[in-house]
Image (tube, rainbow, N blue to C red):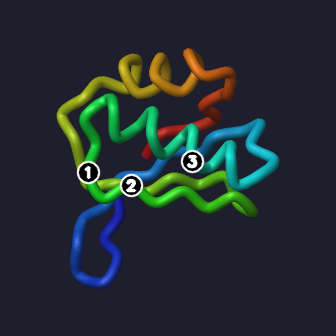
């Protein structure tokens, strides 16, 4: 977990994204998994979102199900 602008955020690094369609797919998958305030940066592959009680396995599965890889969750 990290604090940004006074708020706690959680981050995930996703590899394999190459376009804005990829960003939308990843965003939709994370929102569909139950995350809020999802932001995905194409250049860095970093996704930020509100802290969650979802397991790392559930988040990884949501991303892998659409064909991308999770490199790290913090």
Residue 70, x across and y down, in percent = 60, 31
In the image, residue 16 sits, relative to residue 36, either above or below, namely: above
On-image quarter of the N terminus:
bottom left
Provide the residue designation for mark 1.
Answer: 36
Looking at this view, name the residue that lies furthest to the left: 53
Q: Secondary structure at mark 3?
A: helix
Q: Residue at x 81, y 47 (%)?
A: 18
Q: Residue at x 35, y 54 (%)?
A: 49
Residue 5, x across and y down, in percent = 31, 84
The reply to whether callout 2 and callout 1 are in contact (CB within 8 Å) is yes
Looking at this view, name the residue that lies furthest to the right: 18
Q: Secondary structure at mark 2?
A: loop
Provide the residue designation for mark 3.
Answer: 24
Q: Nearer the viewer, residue 57 or 63?
A: 63
Mark 2 closeness class: few <14, some 14–19, many ≥20 residues within 10 Å: some
Q: Nearer the viewer, mark 3 or mark 1?
A: 3
Q: Secondary structure at mark 1?
A: loop
Measure how far apart labels 3 and 1 are at the Cα level: 14 Å
The reply to whether callout 3 and callout 1 are in contact (CB within 8 Å) is no
Residue 34, x across and y down, in percent = 25, 35
Provide the residue designation for mark 2.
Answer: 38
């Amino acid at each position: 977990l990290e604090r940004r602008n006074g708020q706690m955020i959680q981050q995930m690094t996703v590899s394999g994204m190459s376009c804005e369609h990829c960003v939308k797919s990843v965003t939709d998958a994370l929102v569909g998994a139950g995350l809020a305030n999802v932001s995905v940066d194409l250049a860095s592959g970093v996704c930020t979102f509100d802290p969650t009680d979802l397991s790392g396995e559930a988040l990884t599965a949501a991303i892998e199900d659409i064909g991308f890889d999770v490199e790290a969750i913090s």
